[in-house]
Amino acid sequence: MASIKAVTATVFIDGEAGTTGLEIRERLAGTPGIEMRSIDPEKRKDPAARAELMRQVDLVVLCLPDDAARQAVALADELGSDAPKIVDASTAHRVAQGWVYGFAELDHTQRGKIAEATRVANPGCYPTGAIALIRPLVTAGIMPADYPVTVNAVSGYSGGGKAMIEAYEVKHTAPSFELYGLTMEHKHLPEMQTYARLERRPIFVPSVGNFRQGMLVSLPLHLDTLKGKPSRGDIEEVLAKHYESNGGTNTGLVSVTRSATETLKGRISPEDLNGSDQMQLAVFGSDDRQQVVLVARLDNLGKGASGAAVQNIRLMLGIS
């Protein structure tokens, strides 16, 4: 009897030379059921050559600036029924109609939506942490949708791409630490507000530190301003139930650290999950003071970018 040949899906990373593209390619290398395709470097800006390669593959990952990503989608649209599935790692389509948001743990239906989608927008690194903390509270009715949310975050410099990496590692011209995005117009704000289900635009204060990768996203809250005046343990329980549910939310990549104030001794470093696709959530604070700080820790190149893209690719291609 002839053996049955395993079906292999083909993937093309448009923009594979960038930080995210290189990470995705490395993570997909050797994955059973996936064959990587590349374009001739001399033709990487040739629309006809790119369109022809898109026609030949099952899925395209866009690791491009926003305008270039929109142009790439337009190329794919011209292919009609030959168009591949697309995962867009840019900001261009994260709140666009017809695109599925690629945060599989968003709720119990999101994994299924991603698996059935032909167009998936990979989440931003900062919104991944912020939404993971806020959405369960809004869904549970603890946080009103018009609550004045403030999100603080710090990322390793790899999140800034080649120019920032060079400033830190080659030129040594970058500061040890800086806040940025202080015009209140950071490009991650639309998706943060949309998928956290907030009616009021949050204040978002990002920062970058002199370490290559790793990220902390923090959300300070006054407990007595929330519905029902929940305790620190109540907040923790809401998060735990959301990510430990059997309804499909839990993928094993998001965990909640119990009694973080005690178990982590009131401290948390951004780099402990580097090299993984995990995200750790924790609730620090004091019931006596009626104050807590919710923290998400993740690798900005892992669950915050390339790891999330690979998770979405596997769901869309039906690869376990």
Image (cartoon, rainbow, N blue to C red):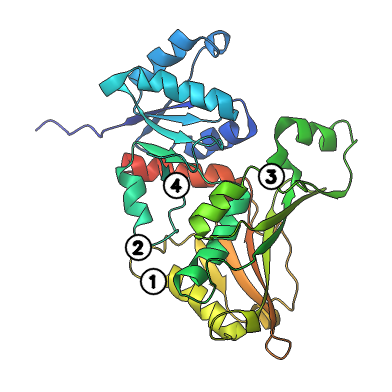
Q: Is residue 14 visible?
A: no
Q: Please tell me whether mark 4 sits on a helix, a strand or a loop.
A: strand
| Circle nearer the N terminus (2, 3) | 3
Q: Quadrant of the N terminus?
A: top left
Q: Which residue is mark 1?
A: 245
Q: Are marks 3 and 4 in contact (CB under 8 Å)?
A: no
Mark seen at residue 248: 2
Q: At which x and y percent is residue 105?
A: 44, 59
Q: Residues within 10 Å of mark 1 (few under 14, many from 20)?
A: few
* Amino acid beneath label 1: Ser
Q: Seen from this angle, which residue lies furthest left? A: 1
Q: Are marks 2 and 4 in contact (CB under 8 Å)?
A: no
Image height of 164 relative to 136, above or below: above
Q: At which x and y percent is residue 214?
A: 69, 52
Mark seen at residue 101: 4
| Circle nearer the N terminus (1, 4) | 4
- Cα gap from disc 3 to disc 4, whole angstroms: 21 Å
Q: Nearer the viewer, mark 1 or mark 4?
A: 4
Q: Residue at x 51, y 53 (%)?
A: 194
- Cα gap from disc 2 to disc 4, whole angstroms: 16 Å
| Circle nearer the N terminus (3, 4) | 4
Q: Residues within 10 Å of mark 4 (few under 14, many from 20)?
A: many
Q: Give the image quarter of residue 151.
A: bottom right
Q: Are marks 2 and 1 in contact (CB under 8 Å)?
A: yes
Q: Which residue is mark 3?
A: 185
Q: Nearer the viewer, residue 20 or 295?
A: 295
